[in-house]
Image (spheres, rainbow, N blue to C red):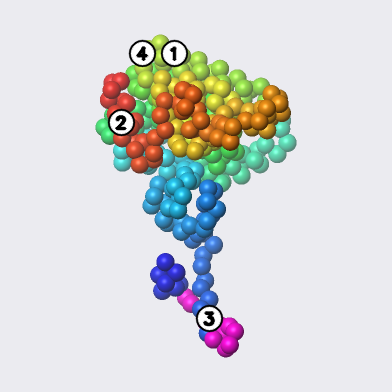
Amino acid sequence: MLKEIMEKKKVQVKKGKNNRKMPKVDIPADMFTKCPGCGKGVYRKDVESAKKTCPNCGKLFRMSAVERIALIADEGTYVPFKNDIKHADPLGFPEYEAKLSKAAAASGLPEAVVSGKCEISGEKAIICVMESKFMMGSMGSVVGEILTSAIEEATERRHPVIIFTASGGARMQEGMVSLMQMAKVSGALAKHNEAGLLYITVLTDPTTGGVTASFASLGDIILAEKGALVGFAGRRVIEQTIRQKLPENFQSAEFLLERGFIDAIVDRDNQKEMLAKLLKMHK
C-alpha cells in the first residue's frame, strides 16, 4: 500500500543516518483513520469499501444518515419528506443557535434525523434515519415532529415504518419540550400499530436515553448492529445507584440479545436483505 501511495504522491528525498537517502511521503491527513475497536490505523478507502467496517478487527464505524440510506434503499427510490420546521428555543439556552449551526455544518443536515419514502428490494416503506453527527442525534422538538409526521404519513399510506436509531437521548437544551417528544412519537406509533401496520427498529451505536425509553423499544421487530451500545442511563450512574458491578458487556447489543430485548443482530452486509424479507412476510 505504501508503494502505491508513493507512486501517486510527490516523494521528497532527504538524507538520513550514514548519508543514506530516505523517502519522505506527503500523506494527506484524511487518508488514514484510527479504528475505535483495535486502535490501529486503517486506510480510509478500505473502511468505506467494507461498509464502514475495520478490515483488521471487524469493528463497525458509525454511518451517516446519507450513507445508511444509500446502503438500504433501492437506488433512485428514496424521496425525502420536506422539512421546513423552525427550531424552538423554549429555555433561551445560551449559545443554542450557534450549536445548531455548528451541528448542521458538521453533518450536512438541518436536523438530527431524516425521513422519506423508499423501496427496499422492491418493497415500499417509510424510513427514518438518525444522524449522530448532529448533536449526537439528540431528540428535540424538530426531531420529534419529523418522526411523528413520517409515522403519520406511513399510517395514511398503509406503509411499514423503519427507524434507524442513533442518539444520546433527549436534547437538554430544550428541557421538558424534548421529553414530550417521547410521548408524541410513541402516540403516533400506537395509531400506526392499531391500523395493523409493521414497525421495525434498527438500533445502531449508540442508542441511549429517552430514545431507548420510547420509540426505539417499541418496534414489532427490533434489530441491532453488532457491538452497538444500547441503554438508558450510563454505566457509571447505574453502578453508583445500585452499588453493584455490572457485567463487562452490559448494554451491548449482544448482552440484550441474550436477554430477549433484541430479536436479532444483523450484519451490515445482510441488513437490506433481512429488511426486505421482513417487509414481504408482513405485507
Amino acid type for the residue under numbered disc 3: Met
Residue assigned mark 1: 191
x, y percentage for residue 155?
39, 18
| Nearer to the camera, 281 or 249 | 249
Which residue is painted at 39% across and 35% down in the image?
266
Q: Give the residues drawn in magenta, as a range.
A: 10-20
Which residue is painted at 39% across and 39% down in the image?
267
Mark 3 or 1, nearer chain start: 3
Question: Closer to us: mark 3 or mark 1?
Answer: 3
Residue 154 visible somewhere in the drawing: no
| 91 sits left or right of 109 in the view | right
Other residues around mark 4 within 10 Å, as few (<14) / some (14–19) / many (≥20): few
Residue assigned mark 4: 196
Q: CA distance from mark 3 to mark 1?
A: 69 Å
Q: Residue 118's quadrant in the figure?
A: top left
Mark 2 or 1, nearer chain start: 1
Which residue is painted at 28% across and 34% down in the image?
121
Are the residues tagged 3 and 1 within 8 Å (C-beta)?
no
- Position of the N terminus by quadrant: bottom left
Q: Secondary structure at mark 2?
A: helix
Other residues around mark 1 within 10 Å, as few (<14) / some (14–19) / many (≥20): some
**Image position of 2 with respect to 238: above or below:** below
x, y percentage for residue 236?
68, 33
